[in-house]
Image: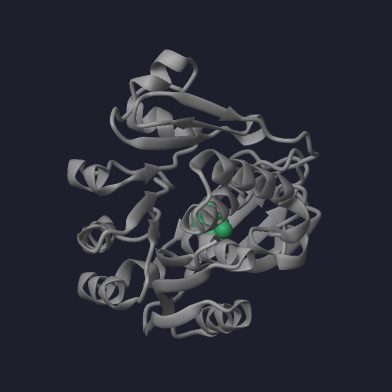
């Protein structure tokens, strides 16, 4: 397999998570079961997952010059992520306030903080200078102008681009054009296409000529090829305790597999198996399998 060199331009957050069987109604106070502080942010989650798989990962982002930012920077070193293009800002680090209910479903409010200060020129510089770069991955927790510039630079040097449109925001036509692989979940697909991915016909009518993977939670994922062929991958039955970061586990491991030269459907199967495992544990990055466990899956 060829070495998987991946750049992730994206967010890094500290996740402050409350677990409660039942979530409060407006005006109600409830006692929960557990509070955790963990590493999160869709960009960092995808970067950590790809690094666990064995990719050479370069993170392009901005951290706060505070305790959260410092802890995230240390974690990047520990995981083996190249942080040459990670800068710090006097704006506080991004945080995510997360509620997880008894069924493992979450509700998240993010405060982007320093993530919204990544500079367009720095992102371009980074993409242009990473040797043997194969894939550039982005999400929607940073400013879209940064992602657009990074993808332009990526396509100019022949890289593959993957956009995870999460959380949903309107995407420019230009960005969609520069995106080789779009990976929305069902909700994001509905926002983008105006309807849920509830039939083959609806899926086939989305982004003709381009590759899309819709992640379907416990149902696995479906790949819509540029020629509108559909390939479904089902997920193993598991008991979900926390779905936070499962989509990121899919994107990070899929990007790794694709960059390693796996065929798209095999890369998708790999991503589904890793994401399914991640929902059986609490937290985002804390739920991801390490290299030893990943070796038992493939
Ligand atoms: O996708 C999960 C992530 O969304 C969490 O880790 C949280 O930080 C938010 O960005």
Name the foreground residue: 83 vs 228: 228
Q: What residue sits 27% from the left and 61% below the top?
A: 154
Q: Ligand 1 sits in which quadrant?
A: bottom right
Residue found farthest to the front: 1
Work out whether residue 294 or residue 33 is closer to the camera in this orientation and state it. 294
Q: Give the mark count.
A: 0
Please tell me in which quadrant of the rendered image residue 240 appears: top right
Q: Position of residue 287 (x, y in %)?
A: 71, 58
Q: Is residue 142 above or below residue 23?
A: below
Query: Is residue 243 at all visible to an observer of this figure?
Result: no
Indicate whether 258 appears above or below 146: above
Q: Residue 224 at what x, y percent from top left?
A: 43, 29
Check the image and report above or below for 264 versus 65.
above
Q: In the rendered image, which quarter contains the N terminus?
A: bottom right
111 and 124: which is toward the camera: 124
Give whichever of 233, 15 is nearer the camera.
233
Residue at figure coordinates x 58%, y 42% from the top left: 266
Q: Where residue 70 sits in the image (x, y, percent)?
A: 53, 85
Q: Residue 215: which quarter of the image? A: top right
């Amino acid at each position: 397999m060829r070495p998987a060199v991946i750049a992730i331009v994206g967010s890094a957050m500290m996740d402050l998570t409350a677990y409660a069987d039942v979530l409060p109604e407006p005006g109600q106070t409830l006692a929960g079961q557990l509070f955790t502080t963990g590493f999160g942010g869709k960009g960092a989650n995808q970067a950590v997952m790809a690094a666990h798989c064995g990719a050479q990962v370069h993170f392009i982002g901005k951290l706060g010059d505070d305790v959260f930012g410092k802890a995230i920077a240390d974690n990047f070193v520990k995981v083996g992520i190249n942080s040459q293009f990670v800068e710090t800002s006097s704006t506080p680090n991004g945080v995510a306030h997360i509620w997880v209910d008894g069924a493992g479903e979450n509700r998240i409010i993010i405060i982007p903080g320093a993530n919204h200060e990544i500079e367009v020129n720095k992102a371009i510089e980074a993409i242009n200078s990473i040797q043997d770069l194969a894939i550039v991955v982005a999400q929607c927790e940073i400013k879209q102008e940064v992602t657009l510039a990074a993808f332009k630079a990526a396509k100019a040097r022949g890289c593959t681009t993957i956009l995870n449109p999460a959380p949903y925001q309107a995407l420019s036509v230009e960005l969609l054009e520069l995106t080789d692989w779009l990976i929305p979940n069902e909700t994001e697909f509905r926002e983008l296409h105006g309807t849920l991915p509830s039939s083959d016909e609806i899926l086939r009518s989305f982004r003709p000529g381009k590759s899309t993977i819709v992640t379907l939670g416990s149902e696995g994922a479906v790949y819509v090829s540029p020629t509108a062929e559909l390939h479904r991958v089902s997920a193993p039955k598991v008991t979900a305790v926390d779905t936070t970061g499962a989509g990121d586990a899919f994107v990070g491991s899929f990007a790794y597999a694709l960059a390693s030269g796996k065929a798209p459907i095999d890369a998708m199967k790999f991503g589904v198996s890793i994401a399914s495992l991640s929902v059986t544990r609490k937290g985002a990055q804390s739920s991801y399998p390490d290299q030893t466990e990943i070796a038992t899956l493939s």
